[in-house]
Image (cartoon, rainbow, N blue to C red):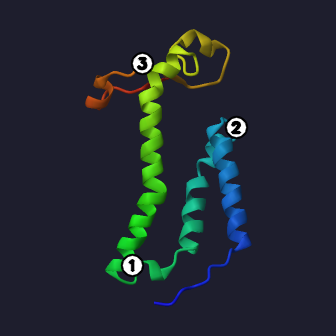
Amino acid sequence: MTTLKTQRIEEIDTIKAIGIICMVSGHAGAPFTRFIFLFHMALFFIASGYTYRHESSESLAALGKTLLKKIKRLWLPFFFWSTFFTLLNNWLININIYTDNPELFKYTRSIRIMNLSTLAHFMSPKETLFTIV
């Protein structure tokens, strides 16, 4: 197997940057959020598909190596930080970083009220950690 030297494609980097700006703007509640949500995920899929390397799936071993690398780089940090902040949820409510007081939303555009976590949240699919206001 030959080693390919990867080169950055500046146009793809620019497309990714525009996608990131659109994603942050959309999730921050920009006035044009509905328009952004029409295309921002497709933009990322197209950019990642364009940079896909065929060598990553030539053999079963190469595919396994690629999947293991993705799990290490993407899934493990996601799992760690999701677990970390889930465990801290009640404490963050108690020190007023998160809030469970719906009266505060008269003064802000935020859409979530965080509820205290219990084991029922994780055992029942109907229970959620937040309420849409």
* Earlier residue among tags 2 and 3: 2
Q: Where does label 3 land, which residue? A: 116
Residue at image position (42%, 18%) is 116
* Cα separation between marks 2 and 1: 42 Å
Figure quadrant of the N terminus: bottom left
**Which residue is rendered at x = 72% and y = 70% of the image?**
11
Query: Mark 2 touching mark 1, by CB under 8 A?
Result: no
Q: SS at mark 1?
A: helix
For discs 1 and 3, the disc positioned in front in the rendered view: 1
Q: Choose between 58 and 112: the one closer to the eye.
A: 58
> For residue 90, what is the image quadrant?
top left
Q: Amino acid at mark 1?
A: Ala
For label 1, the residue is 62
Per the image, label 2 sits on a secondary structure element best described as loop
Marks 2 and 3, how far apart at CA? 29 Å
Task: Give percent across and percent down for residue 38.
Answer: 59, 51
Any mark on residue 30, and which?
2
Q: Residues within 10 Å of mark 2 (few under 14, many from 20)?
A: few
- Residue, x 40% and y 79% (percent of image)? 57
Upstream in sequence: badge 1 or badge 3: 1
Q: Secondary structure at mark 3?
A: loop
Relative vertical location of residue 5 with respect to residue 46 in this rendering, above or below: below
Q: Between label 2 and label 1, give the one nearer the viewer.
A: 1
Tell me what residue is drawn at x 53 percent, y 11 percent: 101
